[in-house]
Image (tube, rainbow, N blue to C red):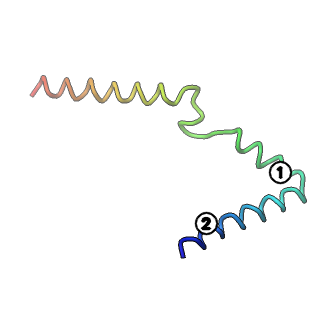
């Protein structure tokens, strides 16, 4: 049963690809969507944001430990 799930996914992807080739405008939209990230991925440097947030958590936990 597990093997069937990936095969269905491959067939589905193949059919979408063929449909996009039949309609050139759709293919362009799919490519454009791939180059328009959203959320944290849209930030110039998502790893820098993660580092900043981790540092903020560290500072907060240290200040709580010192005050209590």
**Residue under circle 1?**
27
Which quadrant would the C terminus be assigned to in this image? top left
Q: Residue at x 43, y 30 (%)?
A: 50
Q: Is residue 8 left or right of residue 15?
A: left
Q: Residue at x 65, y 65 (%)?
A: 9
Tell me if mark 1 has few (under 14), some (14-19) or many (20+) residues whose alpha carbon lies within 10 angstroms of its own: some
Which quadrant would the N terminus be assigned to in this image? bottom right
Depth order, front residue of 4/53: 4
Query: Is residue 33 placed above or below 59 in the rendered structure?
Result: below
The picture places residue 38, in percent across and down from the top left corner, at 60, 40
Query: Is residue 11 placed above or below 61 in the rendered structure?
Result: below
Find residue 15 and report its image quarter.
Answer: bottom right
Depth order, front residue of 15/33: 15
What is the secondary structure assignment of the residue under circle 2?
Answer: helix
The picture places residue 40, in percent across and down from the top left corner, at 53, 36
Q: Residue at x 69, y 64 (%)?
A: 10
Query: Is residue 26 placed above or below 65 in the rendered structure?
Result: below
Query: Is residue 13 placed above or below 36 in the rendered structure?
Result: below
Q: Is residue 12 left or right of residue 38?
A: right
Find residue 21 and report its image quarter.
Answer: bottom right
Depth order, front residue of 24/39: 24
**Residue under circle 2?**
6
As drawn, the residue found furthest toward the bottom would be 1
Would you say the residues marked 2 and 1 are in contact, meaning their CB atoms lie under 8 Å apart?
A: no
Observer-side mark, 2 or 1, equals 2
**Mark 2 or 1 closer to N-term?**
2
């Amino acid at each position: 049963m597990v093997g069937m799930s990936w095969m269905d996914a491959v067939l589905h992807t193949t059919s979408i690809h063929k449909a996009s080739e039949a309609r050139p405008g759709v293919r362009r939209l799919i490519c454009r969507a791939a180059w328009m990230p959203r959320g944290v991925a849209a930030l110039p440097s998502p790893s820098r944001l993660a580092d900043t947030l981790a540092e903020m958590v560290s500072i907060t936990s240290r200040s709580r430990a010192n005050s209590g």
